[in-house]
Amino acid sequence: MPALRASGTVDLLEYQSILDIVVRPLKPQQVNQTNMTDFNEKFDATGLNCPLPILRAKKVLTSMDSGQTLYVISTDSGSVKDFDAFCKQTGNELLESTEADGKYHYYIKKA
């Protein structure tokens, strides 16, 4: 434990060395991330607005086999809630939902 000074403060360097021991950052291989580079079909819904991303993704999923993964890219911010609700209602599994540079990425495993 860092020594408490009479002024009620602690030596920052001493405190930092304790934090380095207690709060070590995880190494990349220790982070539990799903590798989403494997998918069976890709659907680019860029530029489409609600409800088209969902409707067209549903059409693609219809042609896929159970257990296969669909990767969807969308620019519609409303698609975040839409794909979450769609997967819950249809029994499909939303494996991952991320946003990067104004694009929304979804990985959906067909039930």
Image (tube, rainbow, N blue to C red):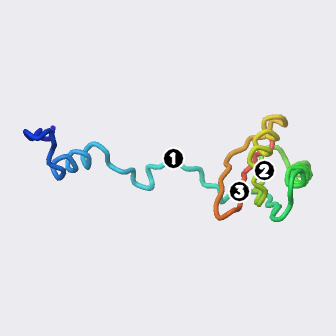
Q: Is residue 10 left or right of residue 91?
A: left
Amino acid of disc 1: Asn
Q: CA distance from mark 1 to mark 2?
A: 25 Å
SS for callout 3: strand
Instruction: Name the residue beneath numbered marker 2.
Output: 79
The residue under label 3 is 105
- Where residue 87 appears, x then y in whole percent? 79, 40
Q: Nearer the viewer, mark 1 or mark 3?
A: 3
Q: Earlier in the sequence, mark 1 or mark 3?
A: 1
**Element at label 1:** loop
The 10 Å Cα crowd at callout 3, few under 14, some 14 to 19, many 20 or more, is: some
Q: CA distance from mark 1 to mark 3?
A: 19 Å
Which callout, 1 or 2, points at the residue further toward the start of the chain? 1
Using a 10 Å C-alpha cutoff, classify the residue at mark 2 as few (fewer than 14 neighbours), some (14 to 19) or many (20 or more).
many
- Amino acid type of disc 3? His
**Foreground: 5 or 81?**
5
- Determine which residue is flagged by label 1: 32
Question: Residue lying farthest left?
Answer: 6
Whether 49 is drawn above or below 32: the answer is below
